[in-house]
Image (spheres, rainbow, N blue to C red):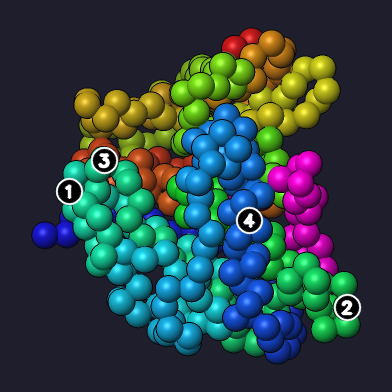
């Protein structure tokens, strides 16, 4: 019997472009090449992870087409097949205004469950199926790096940035509120891309340190002795009575800290953003439910550095709605029964403080 939880994530832009045709026509050969580029150079270029192609050669196999051409079926149920799929020119209820692409990830909430041709899950939370759908109902065009600079690619969204973002979801990463991160929920505007193109010397070029830290957190290399620092704490209002006005999100629950603050670790010497996280809760899988106590946890930080932290409200381009799946996951039936996440608290001012891992 299937017993699964469902999450979804979107990479969207709040404005629409005019009607255009899709920019590239050589998708049959281009897409596997692009994917191999990302697989070999972006996420698998991150040091300190078990995805790293140098430390773990052979772990990431070349990607290839396994399904018949044009077998995508517009978000039909048969996508839950245990295969990871990328489909272009799709329609779906998920394509609300401004959504360019989204990835739906099926994770196991019990050992041994399967979907389609997937092997039985070995652990709770294992990703069994990730599918990415790209919209093309005339609202957006996408271009490869090669097509980006020529006339055909004018006004196009950068396919490399979008695919790298969606592959981040394949790996289990959620959105980040860091503007420079590839996992920021909004796509770069047409004609622009995120970060640097990957090169042999900077294989993970499109990623930001925040993306790298997230990959290290999910896929930590046991041999990594550098990125093992952690800073943990709570975001609390200066006046604790400020929380008294927040209604309990569900019977028996109380809110004892700031929920939904973005906590950012900045290298004190360079000012570079190293990592960020959403704070506000603590979870003990063996002892649910989730507690909304303002806790945050920044892990896999490089040692031998000093950090400044700041906590800021989610009131910029990235809004609480872009992280709704994070909050939904906190109170999934398996993670925290009978729990309802309280609303994101944006009623505070940014504060900066120093910390060391
Ligand atoms: Zn996304």
Distance from Cα at disc 4 to Cα at disc 1: 30 Å
Mark 4 and mark 1 in contact? Answer it, CB < 8 Å: no
Depth check, front residue: 205 or 203: 203
Query: Which structural element holds mark 2?
Result: loop
Mark 4 / mark 3, whichever is N-terminal = 4
The spot of residue 75 in percent (x, y) is: 40, 78
Question: Residue 145 appears in which quarter of the rendering?
Answer: bottom right
Depth check, front residue: 2 or 278: 2
Mark 4 / mark 2, whichever is N-terminal = 4
- Does the closest atom of ligand 1 sit within 8 Å of the Cβ of label 2? no
Q: Which residue is mark 2?
A: 150
Mark 2 / mark 3, whichever is N-terminal = 3
Quadrant holding the N terminus: bottom left
One can see residue 350 in this view:
no
Distance from Cα at disc 1 to Cα at disc 3: 8 Å
Distance from Cα at disc 4 to Cα at disc 3: 27 Å
Distance from Cα at disc 1 to Cα at disc 2: 50 Å
The spot of residue 106 in percent (x, y) is: 34, 57
Q: Is residue 308 left or right of residue 137?
A: right
Magenta highlight range: 180-203
Query: Which structural element holds mark 4?
Result: helix
Distance from Cα at disc 4 to Cα at disc 2: 22 Å
| Nearer to us: label 4 or label 3 | 4
Whether residue 56 is situated above or below residue 175 in the rendered picture: above
Mark 1 and mark 3 in contact? Answer it, CB < 8 Å: no
Q: Which residue is mark 3?
A: 123
| Nearer to us: label 4 or label 1 | 4
Q: Which residue is mark 4?
A: 38
Residue that appears at 26% across and 65% down: 117
User: Which label sits on residue 112?
Assistant: 1
Residue 74: within the magenta?
Answer: no
């Amino acid at each position: 019997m299937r017993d699964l939880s469902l999450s979804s994530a979107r990479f969207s832009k709040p404005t629409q472009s005019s009607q255009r045709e899709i920019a590239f026509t050589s998708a049959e050969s281009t897409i596997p090449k692009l994917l191999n580029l990302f697989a070999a150079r972006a996420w698998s270029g991150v040091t300190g992870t078990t995805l790293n192609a140098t430390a773990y050669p052979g772990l990431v196999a070349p990607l290839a087409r396994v399904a018949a051409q044009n077998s995508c079926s517009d978000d039909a149920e048969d996508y839950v097949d245990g295969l990871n799929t990328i489909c272009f020119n799709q329609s779906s209820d998920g394509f609300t205004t401004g959504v360019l692409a989204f990835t739906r990830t099926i994770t196991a909430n019990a050992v041994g469950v399967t979907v389609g041709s997937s092997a039985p899950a070995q652990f709770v939370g294992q990703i069994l199926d990730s599918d990415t759908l790209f919209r093309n109902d005339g609202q957006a065009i996408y271009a490869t790096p090669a097509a980006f600079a020529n006339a055909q690619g004018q006004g196009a969204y950068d396919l490399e940035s979008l695919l790298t973002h969606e592959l981040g979801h394949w790996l289990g990463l959620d959105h980040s509120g860091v503007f420079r991160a590839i996992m920021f929920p909004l796509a770069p505007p047409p004609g622009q891309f995120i970060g640097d193109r990957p090169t042999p010397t900077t294989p993970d070029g499109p990623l930001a340190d925040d993306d790298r830290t997230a990959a290290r957190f999910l896929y930590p290399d046991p041999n990594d002795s550098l990125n093992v620092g952690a800073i943990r704490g709570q975001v609390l209002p200066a006046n604790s009575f400020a929380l008294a006005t927040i209604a309990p999100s569900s019977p028996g629950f109380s809110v004892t800290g700031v929920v939904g603050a973005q906590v950012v670790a900045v290298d004190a010497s360079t000012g570079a953003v190293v990592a960020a996280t959403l704070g506000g809760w603590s979870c003990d899988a063996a002892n649910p439910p989730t507690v909304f106590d303002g806790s945050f946890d920044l892990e896999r930080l490089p040692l031998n550095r000093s950090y400044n932290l700041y906590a800021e409200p989610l009131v910029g381009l990235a809004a609480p709605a872009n992280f709704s799946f994070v909050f939904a996951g906190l109170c999934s039936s398996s993670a925290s029964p009978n729990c309802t996440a309280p609303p994101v608290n944006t009623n505070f001012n940014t504060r900066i403080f120093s910390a060391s891992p």
